[in-house]
Amino acid sequence: MEKEEAAAAAADPDADPDADCDAQADADPGAERLRRAAERSLGLAAGQGAAGPALGGLVAGTAGPVLLAWRGTDGRLALGPPPPPPGRRKALFFLRGPGPGEPLCGDLPEDLLPHFAALVEEVIVPILTNKQNHQGWPKVVSEDLTRHVHRLRSTALKVVGQVKGKTLLPLPAGSEGIEDIDLDNEDCLQLIDKSLVPAAESAIIDWSHQTQEALRKDSAEPLLQGTNPSPKVELQFWKSRCEDLESIYHQLTTRRVSNMLGLLERAGSSYVPAFKAMLRDVEAALREAQDIHLHLAPLRRHLEAIETVEFSKVKPLLLPLLHVVCLIWVTSKSYSVPMRIAVLLQEICNLLIQQAQLYLAPEELLRGEMEESLGKVQMVLSILNGFKESFEERRAQLHTYYEPGQEVRLWDFPATMVFARLDSFLRRLQMVEGLLTTALDLMKLEKLEFSGVKGKALGQQVQQMYEEFQEAFKVFAERTYNCLDLTNLDFEQDSFAFQQKAADLDGRLGTVLSQAFSDASDLEHTFKVLEMFGSLLERPGMAADAADSYSVLLHRLSSALDHAQLLYCRQMKAELELGRAPVHRNMPPVAGALCWAEELRARIQLPLGRLRSLPQCCLEPAEARRVVEKSEALVQLLDR
């Protein structure tokens, strides 16, 4: 209806050119008629858009022969040459003929390819293959044109099928109406075009190529191409394969094709066995695809649960998912192939990596709160390592899924076949974890304060190191890359450079520790220095200096315990000589003795408690054990 209105408007010589014109009073009347026709057809307000220059050039013949009209993004009439812009729902075309007259006008559908295929099938083929239109033509020209037209129809049909993800088998020329012919009736056979036999044989060759191409498709192709598909791609592949093979099977078993095959059998064609073998291959592949599609269907619910829940809550969902995978392996005859189950498991790993990246937000991972980012990274590491452990557990228990008497088939493929990409992702996460841990440790440099003779100088050195750390870490805030992208090597280079700088700072910080430790005058100040450094003492670059400091600390603590033991012996000796224990002034004998014992106990146990609260990585076990045993022995003496 819109096309008729547009054509009527274009052919109306009496239309008022100024009724809805928006800007150009002297515009070409023919151009204005085309503009109003386009506005009505596209449902636009009258007078929206300047149509004069483009349509005027089309009518006058100074522009190209084809012009398209569509609704612009601003809601106004937009004009331009082909092709139309993507995303438009409807368009019109204006086509200027070779002679004088108004341009032709018509609708341009959104999906051009099916429209073209229908045009070929319903317009071009009937017109160009009609023998009445070939009168006076040489036979060779007529046959050549017919052959090219049918080839065009076949090509258009194949391309439409490929776009839709289906295999469409073009029928040979001359097969029209053969489904209504009785092959047992000799009179009916006389009605069949004699050229149908070679055309049918050529069609069987083409069908064989098409079906073989469909049968060769493998669900592992996206993995091999490096697109890192999720398990839903696997499920969709087998669903599409099942539908495609069903379509091929139905096309090969229609009455028209069956009658065509019967004709070939009567003619003794050698292509009949090839057709039957092709049909058997399609039937076998269809049964396989139906079996796999049926058994993979229960996975969809588990996969959707993993995609919808926050990744921190994914861990309880992994074991049920692997349980379903084990059931698929045991119950599906077609899917119990190591290569196929390995593909599915790799795709599950891809899904976990994808969800982990969404949870971590890698673009902000090194820019946000470090403690929060580190906690997220450690949680993801725990979940992914837990998935690997669950896989090994299910693999070890796979025999329990089989019924008694069933042949047991184990997953004898190497785990590296499944976890190659996941392991690379885990290594990248560990790199990020180390980076964040180092940054959190070095952030403590800002709060280090020293006392004593060298306190001010040491504080200035540490402040300088803190500024150098900030400058080195600022690189990650300025970068825009995805730090979890395994193909991005820039992050690895930046991380390596930062860790080198951190190692240099560790060495210099170890020197500061040694100087601060030597400046500590007594056991109390020694403990304060070590407690101030805290977890920095566990850094690899400070291990040697921390070990030396701990050795000095243990020696001082042992001396303090020796002094406490000496005080105890003096107290016991004085009690024997005087008949009672010396006590503080103005205290009763019993209460004073108890008070003295508690003070000595505190003098023994408090340093020991502070020792145990320090990082234990640099403690010498044997030396520390001797100090602990000495303190416990003194406490036992006090308890008597």
Image (cartoon, grey):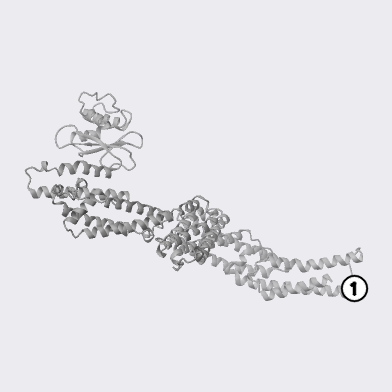
Tell me if 629 is positioned left or right of 366 in this view: right
- Quarter that holds the N terminus: top left
Residue 91 x/y as whole percent: 29, 37
Residue 494 x/y as whole percent: 47, 62
The residue under the point 23% across, 51% down is 257
Q: Is residue 220 visible?
A: yes
Question: Which residue is identified by label 1?
Answer: 575
- Quarter that holds the C terminus: bottom right
Disc 1 residue type?
Glu
Question: Disc 1 on helix, strand or loop?
Answer: helix
User: Which of these two is toward me, 406 or 589?
Assistant: 406
Residue 227 x/y as whole percent: 39, 57
The residue under the point 54% across, 63% down is 434
Tell me if 451 is positioned left or right of 78 in this view: right
User: Which of these two is toward me, 10 or 520?
Assistant: 10
Location of residue 379 by image quarter: bottom right
